[in-house]
Amino acid sequence: MSTLIIIVFVLGYLAIAFEHPIKIDKAASALLTGVLCWVLYVFSGVEHSDVEHGLAHHVYEIASILFFLMGAMVVVELVDAHEGFSVITEKITTTNKIKLLWIVGLISFFLSAVLDNLTTAIVMVSLLRKLVHDKPSRWLYAGIVVIAANAGGAWSPIGDVTTTMLWTGGQLPDTATFMLNLFLPSFVCLVVPMIILSFSLKGKLGSRNNTEENMDTAKWERNLVFFLGLGGLVFVPVFKNFTHLPPFMGMMFSLAVIWITTEIIHRKKNHEQKSKLSVVETLRRIDTASVLFFLGILLAVGALQEVGLLASLANFLDKNLKNVYIINVTIGLLSALIDNVPLVAAAQGMYDIAFTGAFAENGQFWQFLAYCAGTGGSCLIIGSAAGVAVMGLEKIDFIWYLKKISLLAFLGYAAGAAVYVVMHL
């Protein structure tokens, strides 16, 4: 039965990759794949109660991610509805493609370390829609956002789910140490693709209209909602650290505060003006298909994990590769095909924290695992939460990303890994 589950997963993966040729939305393929994997697991001879328990566990984890994603999307859409991003776009006046590439990449890199790679990807796509109107060019910048967001999240304890797992799990308790050790490899992971891309980008983008004409909000309203929205996103990791509640709870808290604030500042406007700027209207505009796509992918990966395939894969790597650097590099590349969260969880379960050596607290194995699992997913667009979000929001084709961005992402990943290895030889 495990073989059948793998076959269904691979076929579903291919259906997502060839979404445009077969003309079936990737969300439908992902949902069907996720459900079929669990159906096959039910008929594998496992006790029904065990299946229900496993599904409930995965649904909780998936729901936490989806509620976080939906909350972040609503906050960003609300800021966008108030033209709040004009606070940033008015400052970015360049139309030079190369300069804009570096601006977008560096903003995404450092913003991801403060927020997280998923939220950063959503914010930056909204910014790109204001800055770049040409779709092929915007997709190219969006690809760099995926690489930058994942690279920026890898060196921060709150920048990526896997890094947070290693931080809270006791493998990387000393944040200052692993941030210093991972900053340079992560930065190289971004800089290498941008240098290569800089040689091929030519010309200028079309002019943008940054005037306040046709805006439905006053300047103070735009500024208030922008800083309230950004502050709400930054507050999420702070909320988690103080309360130890899941991040989606902090996101819901921030959304509630912003919701109440916008209701108050627009309460005297007429119904037509108020409705366009309300959270209720914003909820209608968020991309629900992307959320369902995420649900399907995570259900499918959860089934693979529940069957024990991912744990078997981790054990196979441990027995056959035997080198901590090679194991981590391979895990990073596999995370482009399979979600990095269960792979890191499997690695945490395989290796105990040692007193000394590579497996000690803040040891080289755990640091390098944080880098590889965080950045390796950039090699494919569905290999990371940031990539899935950008794919859904911008409708980027899997094959297009494979042709235009995957090699750049791999070269950056390999260069950053080489830097880390050289630093610790």
Image (spheres, rainbow, N blue to C red):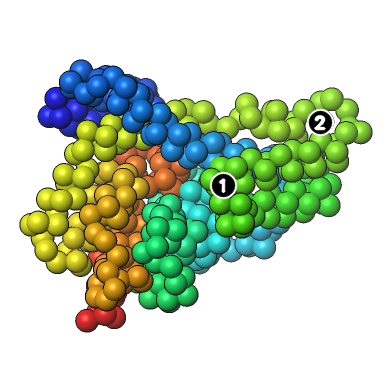
- Residue 329: where, in percent of width, then height? 22, 61
Rendered residue at 72%/55% (across/down) = 227
Q: For the residue carrying disc 1, how many other residues have a C-alpha within 10 Å: few (<14), some (14-19), or many (20+)?
A: few
Q: For the residue carrying disc 2, how many other residues have a C-alpha within 10 Å: few (<14), some (14-19), or many (20+)?
A: some
Looking at marks 1 and 2 on the same chain, the residue that comes earlier in the sequence is marked by 1
- Residue 55: where, in percent of width, then height? 36, 28
Q: Is residue 231 above or below residue 269?
A: below
Q: Nearer the viewer, residue 408 or 295?
A: 295
Q: Which residue is mark 1?
A: 245
- Residue 283: where, in percent of width, then height? 63, 30
Q: Which residue is mark 2?
A: 274
Task: Left or right? Give the position of 193 relative to 106.
Answer: left
Give the foreground label among 1 and 2.
1
Q: Nearer the viewer, residue 196 or 242?
A: 242
Task: Measure the alpha-carbon separation of dots 1 and 2.
Answer: 33 Å
Q: Secondary structure at mark 1?
A: loop
Quadrant (top left/top right/bottom left/bottom right) for the N terminus: top left
Residue 64 at least partly seen: yes
Rendered residue at 62%/56% (across/down) = 242
Q: Quadrant of residue 420?
A: bottom left
Q: Quadrant of residue 4?
A: top left
Q: Amino acid at mark 1?
A: Leu
Q: Amino acid at mark 2?
A: Lys
